[in-house]
Image (cartoon, helix red, strand yellow):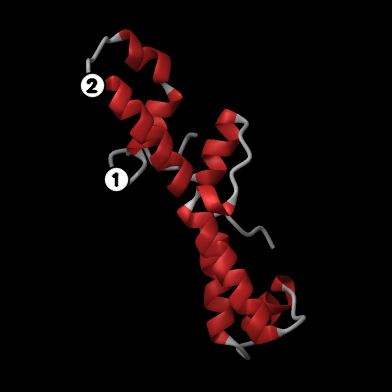
Amino acid sequence: MRLDSIYYEEDVNWSLVVVGFETEFAALKDPLFDIERDLAHQTARHWRPMQYGAFTGEVISPSDSYVLKKVALYEAAIGEIGGTISVRRLGRLGAQGQDRRHRATHLRLRSSGLCTV
């Protein structure tokens, strides 16, 4: 669940720390920790599904994650627009400057770590 950055306070990244060090935080006996733990798991599952799934061993489905829902919507839209054009083909088209919109979507998916092609 380690990030490339040393900062975890941004946006939803705090949840990775709480999930990763859940036992240590529980040992502090914070009366509100049960609420924080549940929120951290929910946040990580929704917004960092790949890291969360790899750490917990859970299989995260699109119905469990906002990010995976968005990816599914992008994939459906790409399928409707491109027919049978694969994501790999979209990358080649975009690299040639022929289809910038699809290339931008592909790059966003790659930078989020959700697409490896």
- The amino acid at mark 2 is Leu
Q: Tell me the crowding category of disc 1: few under 14, some 14 to 19, or many 20 or more residues within 10 angstroms, Cα based.
A: few
- The amino acid at mark 1 is Glu
Q: Does 85 appear above or below 50?
A: below
Looking at the image, the residue that sits furthest to the bottom is 98
Looking at the image, the residue that sits furthest to the left is 31
Count of residue discs: 2
Say left or right for 75 vs 4. right
Q: Tell me the crowding category of disc 2: few under 14, some 14 to 19, or many 20 or more residues within 10 angstroms, Cα based.
A: few
Which of the 4 image quadrants contains residue 26? Answer: top left
Query: Disc 2 versus disc 1: distance between alpha carbons?
Result: 21 Å
Circle 2 sits on which residue?
32
Circle 1 sits on which residue?
10
Instruction: Point out the tag, 2 or 1, that comes first from the N-terminus.
Output: 1
Name which residue lies at 43% across and 40% down. 44
Q: Does 30 appear above or below 18?
A: above
Residue 58 is situated, as x and y percent measured from the top left of the image, at 61, 34
The residue tagged with tag 2: helix, strand or loop? loop
Residue 70 is situated, as x and y percent measured from the top left of the image, at 50, 63
Name which residue lies at 50% across and 50% down. 65
Looking at the image, the residue that sits furthest to the front is 63
